[in-house]
Each structure stands twice: as C-alpha cells, then as structure tokens.
Image (spheres, rainbow, N blue to C red):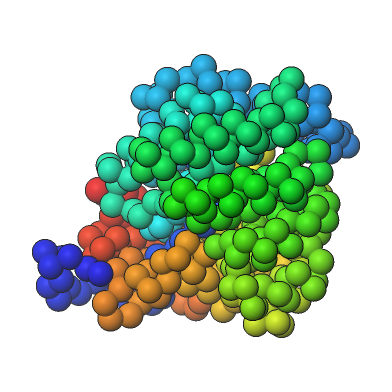
Amino acid sequence: MLEQKYSASRHLLATGEIVVPGFVDPHTHLVFQGSREEEFQQRLAGASYLDILQKGGGIMETVNKTRQTSQFELLTIAQDRLNTMVEAGTTTLEIKSGYGLRFEDELKILRVIHKLKEQNLCRIAATFLGAHAVPSGMAPEDYARIVIEEMIPSVRREGLAEFCDVFCENGVFNPQLSRKILRAGTRNGLRPRIHADQFTESQGAGVANEVRAASADHLVHSKLGELERMTQTSVTPVLLPASSHSLLSGKYAPAKDMLSKGLPVALGTDFSPSNWILGQLTVAAVAARGLRMKADEIIRGITINAARSLGLEHTIGSIAPRKRADIVVLKVPSHKRIGYTYGEGMVDKVLIEGREIVKEGKRVY
C-alpha cells in the first residue's frame, strides 16, 4: 500500500503513450561473478548444457568465481545489474542464491540480496537455492543432507530468504531428494519453489504439486496431466522462454496448453550467466515467438501472474486502489507493441510507490 508521504495526487504527462503495471520478474539469478561466453561458443558447436555441466563447466565455473569474490564486490556487481532491470521497467523481482554451494558462500550471496533490499525501492523476494547443483566430488545425498541440516536452519535464523528452491533434474537432484529439501524448507518457514523439467521429464512438476509449491519454473518437458493438476494445487507455472532461446534447445514450455486450462502463466527472465537477459520486454518478444503468447497474455505474465507466483498479487501486479503505485509508462501507442518489438527504447518512466525512479528511460533516483 502506498505510504502516506507519497499519497498526494500527482499528474504525469503520458500523451500518446500507454500506462501499465510495473513489471514483476519472478525468477532471477542476479548475484554471481563472471560470465560464460566461452561456454556459449561450445553450445553453438553442439555441446548440450548438461554435457558441459558434467565436465565441470556451467554452474561450477560460476561457483568457483563467485566463491573467490567478496561480498562487497558482489553487491556492486548486482546493483549495476539491478539498475538496468529497473530502467527496463522491473519494479519487483525475485533473486536466488545458488552460486556458492557451500555454507559460507550461500549465506554470503543471501546477505548481498538482503543488502540490495535495504538500498533499493524496488521490492525484492529472496530465494535460497543451495540445491542448485551438486559440488564436485560429492554425492547428491550427502550434499542434500548439508543443505537440509546446516544451510536451511541458518537461513531461517538470519531471516535471509522467503523461499526455498531446488533444481530437480536427472543427474542433479532426483524427485526424492527434491521433496526432502523443499519439505525441510517448509518446516523452516520457507515457501517452496522448484526448477522443474527443464531438460527432461524429471517429475519436477509432480513434486511441485505434491508440496504445493508457490511456483514451478521452466516446465519444458512436464506431463500435461501434472500441469493440469496445478489448477487444483494452486502452483503458479513460471515460464522462462529466454532460457530455452539462450540454451539453443529449440524446445519451449507448452504455454498455450496451460493457458487453455486456465492456468495463470507467469514469465521471468531467468537472468544468469547462461542467459544474459535483464529486461522483461525482451522476454515478451521471445514469449510471443517461442510460446505463441499474445500481448494481453504476456502482459498478465509479467505483472499480475508473476506477482501471484511470489504471493504478492494483493499488493502489486495491477493498477488498483490500495495497491502499490508501481507503474511503467511506455512510448508506444498500443499495448500490442509488447511482444511485437524487442523493447529497445520503449520505457519512458518507471514509478515505484508513486516515486519517479526512471525518467526518459534513465534512472534518476
């Protein structure tokens, strides 16, 4: 709800423009060090993401760089990325840990996220993703035990996250371990989210339904029956078409099937070293082409449905009385330009809680 000091009536000039709710990004990996353009070249040559991961690349390359980086430097890097996201219209986002994969480094990343919350007006939801990968030389069962017995209780004690996530995939965390990790998170006050069925049908959507997760993300290879069950379990599907695009998989989640079942499909950037996309308007363009989503479906996906996946649909995600005045003004004559273009130069103004944060496409606060 808008604070009293910002509640006075204001007028903004938006002649020939459109006004939409502030964009909500429900899936990001904002805090890490380094980049992986060499890996991208390997994928262009035919290597799969899982092949690279099994050879010690992928996530583990980023983990090693992130472990060697101080908390202060990670904060500086993440703030620069967040500034770009806000200038692109994002007013609320989720940020995951997951590039530490050991006790002190996972907490370091979560503390960076906590500091970002303190120094920014945009709303940030923190997710503990200690179960992002299995550290080199460890069995999944042994690492899962550390996540459950050591990491999750510490995250709870410091109040560093609202959600707990796990990468449920063949060769990473199987359904049994994923359930254990998410249920341990629930016992410690962390709502479950899950990386589900990104590369194979790994039963991730089924796990999401069993634990009644806040969201199931990716869902590229999920069984339609499990997707349909989400209408009863209230799991929000979060689709990440830019990730499929960047990983050159050629396979996208069945968005039209989900929409036909009445599911509230949300869209996120999945910003990460393997998918360097920070703006939801770029995601909109990929969703239009890869998922065949229409403009109105996309707008709901990056606003109210994304807010729903974070449990925030009653305070953000639409322009309505008693909701936060998070607003984006776009320099286009029609909402149908969303998805049609790739978003370059579209953002004029961004307001967070009624305060003008971006003016003429540049951050001013």
Taking the image as shown, residue 37 lies to the left or right of residue 78, namely right
Q: Is residue 340 above or below residue 98?
A: below
Q: Residue furthest right?
A: 46
Question: Between residues 287 and 149, which one lies in front from this camera angle?
Answer: 149
Taking the image as shown, residue 52 lies to the left or right of residue 152, namely right
- The structure residue drawn at horizontal position 47% and vertical position 24%, both measured from the top left corner, is 104
Residue 201: x, y in percent? 83, 56
Which of the 4 image quadrants contains residue 232?
A: bottom right
- The structure residue drawn at horizontal position 53% and vertical position 48%, both measured from the top left corner, is 185
Which of the 4 image quadrants contains residue 7?
A: bottom left
Question: Between residues 92 and 8, which one lies in front from this camera angle?
Answer: 92
Taking the image as shown, residue 170 lies to the left or right of residue 148, namely right
Q: How many marks?
A: 0
Question: Between residues 268 and 97, which one lies in front from this camera angle?
Answer: 97
The quarter of the image holding the N terminus is bottom left
- The structure residue drawn at horizontal position 33% and vertical position 45%, both measured from the top left corner, is 117
Residue 196: x, y in percent? 71, 54
Q: Is residue 14 above or below residue 77?
A: below
- The structure residue drawn at horizontal position 57% and vertical position 21%, both measured from the top left corner, is 65
Q: In this rendering, does residue 42 appear at all?
A: no
Residue 79: x, y in percent? 38, 37
